[in-house]
Image: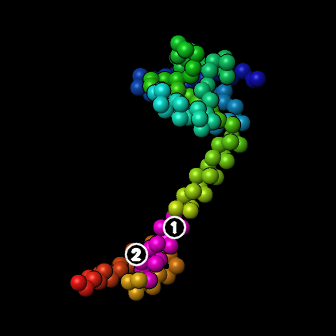
Amino acid sequence: MAKAKITVKPNPGDLPTPLKVGGKDPAFKYRFILDEKPRIAEMLTRGWKLCTKADNPNVETAYLRDDGLWGSGDTILAKMPMAKFKEHQARVRQRTDRQMKSVETSLYHELARLGVQADGDIKTSVSKGLPPIPKEEE
């Protein structure tokens, strides 16, 4: 493993971010997580691993906590293999696309019920202004 040094000097109130932490392995995605047991447990079950001194022995001592983890303030640095991170991102995108398609389908059905013809771009149709919703007869 190549030796790397942290080049950032911590300032009071300035948290290091994954972009500022040196010596990162490009095969991993890094992020800071809140140092609370429920949050740590959640992130560990998602596949994140807490970064320790063994991950990079040259980390500046200002960022090493007493328990041997990288961190600053109430955050801890964690990492996940890049391949697993990309798989997770793809799943999130698929879920979001499914949800958006469902919303768009519902909106198209509602527009059709109101007699409004959508031009294929819901945002454009909505931003042009829709006629008032007719009051249902009692």
Residue with the mark numbered 2: 126
Seen from this angle, which residue lies furthest right?
A: 1
Q: Position of residue 101 (x, y in %)?
A: 54, 67
Q: Position of residue 79 (x, y in %)?
A: 62, 32
Indicate whether 110 appears above or below 20.
Answer: below
Q: Residues within 10 Å of mark 2 (few under 14, many from 20)?
A: few
* Amino acid of disc 2: Val
Q: Is residue 21 visible?
A: no
Of residue 59 and residue 134, the one placed in the foreground of this image is 134
Indicate whether 37 appears above or below 116.
Answer: above
Residue with the mark numbered 1: 102
Residue range of the region highlighted in magenta in the rendering: 100-112
Q: Which mark is residue 3?
A: none
Name the residue rendered at 53%, 12% in the picture.
66
Seen from this angle, which residue lies furthest left?
A: 138
Of residue 2 and residue 44, the one placed in the foreground of this image is 44
